Image (tube, coloured by chain):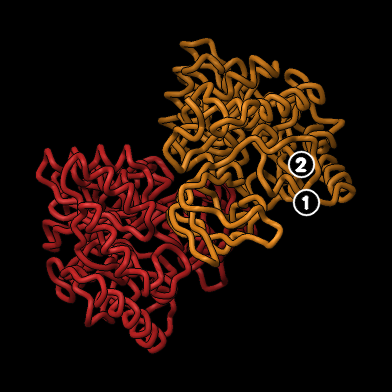
Chain colours: A red, B orange
Amino acid sequence: VRLHDLPTPTLWVDLAALDHNVDVMAAARPGRSLRPHVKAFKSTALAAHVRDRGGHDAFCCATLKEVAGLVASGLGDDVLLANETLDRDRLGDLVAAATERGARVTVAVDSAETIAAAADAATNGPLAVLVDVDVGLPRCGCPPADAGRLADDARAAGLEVRGVMGYEGHVVGNPDRTWRIEQVEVSMALLRAAHDDVGGDVTSAGGTGTYDLHQWVREVQAGSYLLMDTAYARLGLPFQQALFVQATVISASAGHAVADAGLKAFGMDHGEPTVEGCDVFFTSDEHVTFTWSEGHTGPPHVGDRVRLLPAHVDPTVAYHERMWVIDAGDPEGGGEVVDAWPVDLRNW
Amino acid sequence: VRLHDLPTPTLWVDLAALDHNVDVMAAARPGRSLRPHVKAFKSTALAAHVRDRGGHDAFCCATLKEVAGLVASGLGDDVLLANETLDRDRLGDLVAAATERGARVTVAVDSAETIAAAADAATNGPLAVLVDVDVGLPRCGCPPADAGRLADDARAAGLEVRGVMGYEGHVVGNPDRTWRIEQVEVSMALLRAAHDDVGGDVTSAGGTGTYDLHQWVREVQAGSYLLMDTAYARLGLPFQQALFVQATVISASAGHAVADAGLKAFGMDHGEPTVEGCDVFFTSDEHVTFTWSEGHTGPPHVGDRVRLLPAHVDPTVAYHERMWVIDAGDPEGGGEVVDAWPVDLRNW
């Protein structure tokens, strides 16, 4: 089966590009010095591929469903919910499942309420926490000065405190590498101060845009590097675009063409998808309307296949049921279909 | 079960607001003078509700999956794929299924290629077409002057030509009603000219923003009016917001709060979701960070539930597995859960 045999729109992964990305990262941050972030791809099959090829066996998640899916798939050797939750019932169920499977679950906490939820869930089995520290991104995380007190409260509630995390999400996407280097230093000074008060052997931070700028933390949380998108491409990182949406030109006129992939196939918060060599005019629910420059090979024809590049990987993948895995080395018919990885961790 | 008993984020429908919208539209455009557009809600359960309460039994779709789902659910009395397709195999399967179930399927065509695909599928059973005409939105649709020739070609290929459609999508969202009235006239003059050449008794156009501005066409294609969003709210239409995402405040500081619904819960092409009485600062994959004004009832607390309004209904619904149907009349616990409607028509 060839890529062009599949109905469109089709989310697909260039396996060679993915493996290049796995290898580059595994060389830079081997083993547990990287904690691949599952939120970027939401697939246990892809997580297993990263573990087997890249040698990383400790994962990072943004939702309870992601954690539960890893645990159920035997990928729970050391899985971190790098997010706050107050859902005692589901966290408790997760701890029970992890205990049964010998998995190790850690959850971020940043308040008395999230510590109480974790302590409640820990009545079902072992559950560790990281104290989540605000290192400059105005989102979750306690003020650095409160971290020690929260760690004491967590220990008093019977929880194991493994250390600290602090995500410099305001830094990871900035194309200015010098600024990123400076800001990682600023953020990590805050996290280091918090860690002095918290203790524990885990220090966790970072993302794809800062993966090689962290000397101090034990582990970097990066996920987008695997599949990439046009926003991260602007940073000049050594990772290749590995995720595409294949579409069919369903209508064409003298001035524009329309392909059958739209707002329900792409996360749009970082802007329009890209059609190589063309200008995207606008995107509708099930359509992308685009024009082409004089230098282009010529106007597209009805029935042509076009390859679109997402602007933001995470919310793009979350729209799809599966990713088709393509060996693009033999480009006939768009490449050979070698596998299909369900996006089994989407939704909540 | 109450809304607040459900895990978050949760997509939910205010049943009273939905029914208000159904009733207002059914009074304005009864029966087959409205062709509800399934792309806005992607649920056969909601389509059945609209048919039973609103009395509309002819539906409109944007994807083959939507059409196939309606046919399989007994909602295929007169279903239109208001979009072009070149997927002969899936269209052929659909025609076979429709024939077996006594359903009637019509598909839009705007080129020799889409007519050929329809003619090929029609070897499996009856299939009618509408000639899709460009009435000013630069997307699908043939030039008005080509419509008669395409109709002749379709008839020569053995297809029933039921008439014309032309979507004035560049008009429906503009808040200036006077401009919308003028532009509908301009667009419908083009469609009328095409219809003179095509013939047939179906003339189909419009959307939620122009549902009451069409005197000439037989049927209006509107779907967003059922659930609404903050973009359409700006038009001052008599429809109420009926779709919400419930989230939990998982982190709060002196300056901002964070709830657990983000980019994977909202279509973002029309902008940020709204938190009533608050200012949304930014949205991340699984978070919305917001601030509150002095006039607000006070800072949110960790564990509070907040209600978010989507900016664009269609790509928001497409992220979710189901909509919870809520009787909000008794507001205790956020209202009573009366049903759950699967978003069974999402993906392709």
Residue B291 position in % (x across, y down) = 59, 62
Residue beneath label 2, please? Answer: B209
**Residue at (15, 51) in percent of width and height:** A104
Q: Name the amino acid, label 2.
A: Gly
Q: Are marks 1 and 2 on the same chain?
A: yes
- In the picture, measured across the screen, residue B322 lies left or right of residue B164, that is left
Q: Name the amino acid, label 1.
A: Asn
**Residue at (75, 43) in percent of width and height:** B144
Q: Is residue A112 above or below residue B78?
A: below
Q: Nearer the viewer, residue B141 or B52?
A: B52
**Residue at (28, 54) in percent of width and height:** A81
Query: Which image quadrant for residue A139?
Result: bottom left
Q: Earlier in the sequence, mark 1 or mark 2?
A: 1
In the rendered image, the residue lying farthest to the front is: A156
Q: Nearer the viewer, residue A206 or A121?
A: A121
Identify the element where label 2 is drawn. helix
**Residue at (31, 39) in percent of width and height:** A90
Give the alpha-carbon distance from disc 1 to disc 2, as whole Å.
8 Å
The disc label shown at residue B174, or none: 1
- In the picture, measured across the screen, residue B37 lies left or right of residue A297, that is right
Q: Residues within 10 Å of mark 1 (few under 14, many from 20)?
A: some
Residue A94 position in % (x across, y down) = 24, 41
Identify the element where label 1 is drawn. loop
* Residue A233 in view (yes/no): no
Query: Which image quadrant for residue B34?
Result: top right
Residue A93 position in % (x across, y down) = 25, 37
Label 2 marks a residue whose chain is B
Label 1 marks a residue whose chain is B
